[in-house]
Amino acid sequence: MRKLLRVLATGVLAACCAFAAAGTWAADAPLSDAEVSARAKALVAKMTPAEKAGQLTQFFYFGEAMGPLGKDPRMRKQLEDGVAEGNVGSLVLVYEPALANRMQRTALQSRMKIPLIMGLDVIHGLRTIFPVPLAMAASWDPALAERAQSVAASEARAVGIHWAFAPMSDISRDPRWGRVVEGSGEDPYLASKMVAAQVRGFQGPHIGAPGHILSGPKHFAGYGASIGGRDFDEAEISDHELWNTYLPPFKAAVDAGAGNIMAAYMSLNGVPAAGNRWLLTQVLRETWGFKGFVVSDNSAVRSLARQGVAADDKGSAERALAAGLDMSMGLPPYDKPVMGTLPQSLQDKHITAAELDRAVQRILETKIRLGLFEDPFVDEAKAESVLNDPAHHTEARIAAERSAVLLKNEGSLLPLDRAKITSLAVIGPLADSQRDVLGSWVFPFNKPHADSILAGLRAKLGTAVRIDYSEGVRMPPRLYPSPLSALEPRLPARAPLDETAEIARAAGFAQRADATVLVLGEAQDMSGESASRDSFELPGRQQELLDAVVATGKPVIVLLMSARPLNLHDTKARAVLDLWYPGSEGATAAANLLFGDATPGGKLPFTWVRSAAQVPMTYSRIPSHSAGGWDRRYWNGPNTPTYLFGHGLSYTTFAYSGLIVGQPAYKVAEPVTVNVELKNTGARAGDEVAQLYIRQRTGVSSRPVRLLKGFQRVALQPGETRRLTFTLTADDLRYWSAETRAWVQDASVFDVWVGGSSAANLAGSFEVKRR
Ligand code: BGC
């Protein structure tokens, strides 16, 4: 209340006063649309064009720890002056409560006293780091993703952040693209569920709910299809792929109430996304009814000139505004914000006052909903207790355990029996890395912590088990360093390693150990933004290390850290467990999984191709005219992937039976029910992800040979049977046809399969009839 009075005392918002007097301003009850709109409108009416342009301007704040741009205090002063003058409406990279409060006080010095909205890439946690989003998708557990983002939101809000640039909702079918790590994989159905859950996790029951933040799904739209998997290059996507594959996760995000959308960088079918009226207005607002505001990706408004749809900054801002973009995210120079050109455009009549006001209105409405006018400040004394809440770590451990995927487990090598293991070799360039366990989009200045896998095993096994450690080989550096490495602390140089000798030493360790854990994969900066790759080989000499250790003939378990399918050349290692980048509690989770204190239950959210040459390959391909096998297209080698979409083993086994479709025939638009029995046929408790796939036999378009349309992650005790019911809605059975150029639900016979991967073979069918 004191803070509220302080803000009001400075003369903010007559409309807000009336509202506060009514005593209904607390953010734990949502405001009505009419109230929000009236308050924003009253503000807009008092603003100058320059102040309006200020609200459309978001800048990165570079603190001292943030690379070369942070080293110049004069630049920061320039930014703060801009905030005080009302020329900036939002900041990125303000991550400390004291700094957030100082910047808010600065914003309240401006004539209109409009608080800042602080955004950040809160992708998979802030201090407590969860597994990377691709891993979370591998859990096939939307409720888990919702809880994780709710934890992330509480930590972010505790330090003064109001808005996450997440979830990444881009479908990715080309794992050469590094940003696969940030999304939910190849399938629109799975991705839609994961995206919607994350939006709910970030935002809570409504925008402005206490301890929650705004969610900004990105990158609208098509970024995952950058040609050649090359980050930032253009995307060429057919209408049918857009509507059926790339847009559904965004639609799901909008339906889940996302209050913001970030427009992508790249050109979609020749039109840059930040200036793409079809995307930002026709699809997003007119077709889907999105009511929030749209932000550009970093400097993407200014880039419209570089991308050839505007001549200069002024033309870029005009183009973006006309397309339906509201806020420009940008880098210095701070005295030349691209949206700062809009007052001149207004004078020149290149934009209308209504267009400008519309964008400002949307941003102010969001600030009002978030309760920023009532209290833009954060409790500096409380932040650390929220950031260090032990319950957050418990959630992170559970998430790491549930997202791991057991790719291979010959002879049930896993779980290891603690009673029988007296010595272990722990080998590999990622075995003793703390940083790589966390993955990308983790900022050192948020002080995240993780133990290495080696430390996790030591903690679990104590002194009773001898552990021999060798890094084996070094992770080679990237040829072109990641731009994000500017945010990482500089590590001391290490003495060079004689890799040939170290491989021999590692093999010696494996020889004398009861079992070997090899921790291999890609360093965290090999996936993520600006991290495309044209090969799926293990970087450096890791394959040689793997082969040498396997050649000992002793039991070998490979723990993988990666966010793309890596080619292990059909390794004879008996077990392969993909941990992805498992986050703060990854080490404990890995040790629990290896020794059976947790059972893997994750499934692949993408097709694990053999090599980059097979890309793109999806399980949901369109049937071909050729009667010959789709697995014989390349004459020179295996065509099939190494692992199928949806694949993942457990320490127990499951059996599916009794598939029953509710009725043999349904009318168009009627829901279809499918029942199945799932039994844990093994000797251990475990989770199975039951997956339902359909195929529409005939229609105006050719439909995919299989499409995921339902899944349930189920925990079963040994011998336990559960009857599962799936419901297929009209939405699940319709699709966008390039023949009718519209959404259709055809009358057709549908095949349906339920099972533990996209190779599910328990089959049934039903018919959908016109009448
Ligand atoms: C990325 C976005 C991110 C933004 C802000 C951009 O380069 O494409 O995903 O939200 O930077 O950090």
Image (tube, grey):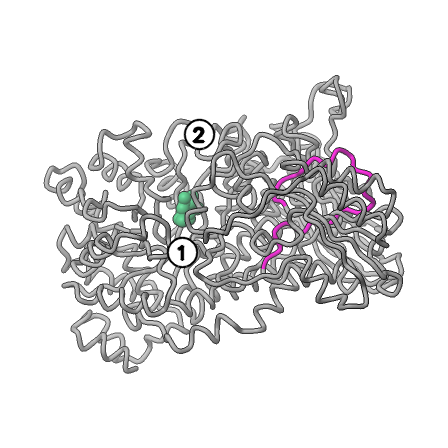
Amino acid type, mark 2: Glu
Query: Which comes before the other along the chain, label 2 or label 1?
Result: 1
Q: Which residue is mark 1?
A: 120
Q: Position of residue 606 (x, y in %)?
A: 65, 41
**Observer-nearest of 190 and 175:** 175
Q: Is residue 43 visible?
A: yes
Query: In the rendered structure, which segment of residues is drawn in magenta?
Result: 562-583
Location of mark 2 (residue): 234
Residue 369 falls inside the magenta stretch: no
Secondary structure beneath dot 1 equals: strand
Answer above or below: position of 595 versus 509.
below
Residue 209: percent from left, percent from top: 43, 69
Q: Quadrant of residue 234?
A: top left
Instruction: Examine the residues drawn in magenta and state their main secondary structure.
Output: loop
Left or right, 655 with reference to 106: right
Name the residue: 52% across, 72% down: 388
